[in-house]
Image: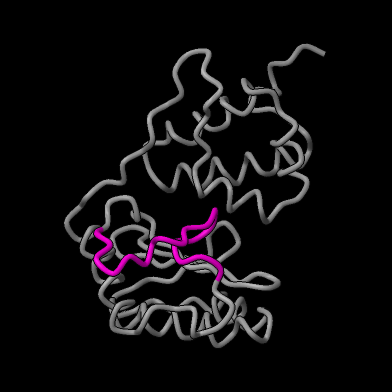
Amino acid sequence: MPTIDKRVDAYIKKAQPFAQPILTHIRKLIHTACPEVEEKIKWSFPNFEYKGVFCNMAGFKEHCSFGFWKQSLMKDPHKIFGKTEAMGNLGKIKSLKDLPSDKIMLEYIKQAVALNEQGVKRVLAPKAAPNSKDLVIHDYLTKALAKNKKAHTTFTSFSYSHKKEYVEWFEEAKTEETRVKRLKTALEWMTEGKSRNWKYVKK
């Protein structure tokens, strides 16, 4: 049986008028492809789980986004990932016409669900090499910062080392639940202008 989260209903209701039918349709397709789906609100937008997160969606002022948690491990026979944005894998969705056909959407959603069913783990990007300035900022952090202007400003102004401290803290989490908790705490700290190790900074 699916797990319906009333907060997702509220999220869609509060979305821009153009976004409501898009989000409603995506949600319907997800439930069709995975009848046992569990809905949750994480990072301030709807996420869908079956043995772990497999996709999410979000509505913004002028567009919507939809993304797969393990997109890097998925096959893309219909080349729908060619428009990948910072958030989501289908580019900026401004109308139902911007979505692939229902048949293709269902195919990809089922593929994402199958990865979780099979216990396939998401491959994390390698940590930056010592003294490297090529720090990998993952999409879950980008999404969270996009929702919190103060935290975004703080993170952007951080030195490379301070950014790295936060990024590695998230990546070192053994479970998704732990990472989500760390991300929530980090956003609170960054909103206050604090670095990862602010408690140990001598005053």
Q: What residue is rendered at 38% in x and 56% in y?
A: 69
Q: Which quarter of the image is occupied by the C terminus?
A: top right
| Camera-nearest residue between 14 and 71 | 71
Q: What residue is rendered at 33% in x and 77% in y?
A: 105
In the displayed structure, 81 sits above or below 97; it is: above
Asked if residue 84 is among those painted magenta in the image, a careful observer would answer yes
Query: What colouring does the structure picture have?
Result: one colour
- Find the magenta span and give its range: 75-92
In the displayed structure, 172 sits above or below 191; it is: above
| Camera-nearest residue between 60 and 150 | 60
| Camera-nearest residue between 142 and 184 | 142
Q: What residue is rendered at 67% in x and 86% in y?
A: 17
Q: What residue is rendered at 76% in x and 50% in y?
A: 149
Rendering quarter of residue 8? bottom right
Residue 37 x, y percent position in the rendering: 33, 73
Q: Is residue 20 left or right of residue 4?
A: right
Asked if residue 26 is among those painted magenta in the image, a careful observer would answer no
Q: Is residue 161 left or right of residue 51?
A: right
Residue 172 x, y percent position in the rendering: 42, 31
Residue 182 x, y percent position in the rendering: 54, 40
Residue lying furthest left: 118
In the displayed structure, 164 sits above or below 52; it is: above
Q: Which quarter of the image is occupied by the N terminus?
A: bottom left
Residue 122 x, y percent position in the rendering: 31, 46
What predominant SS class does the magenta segment belong to?
A: loop
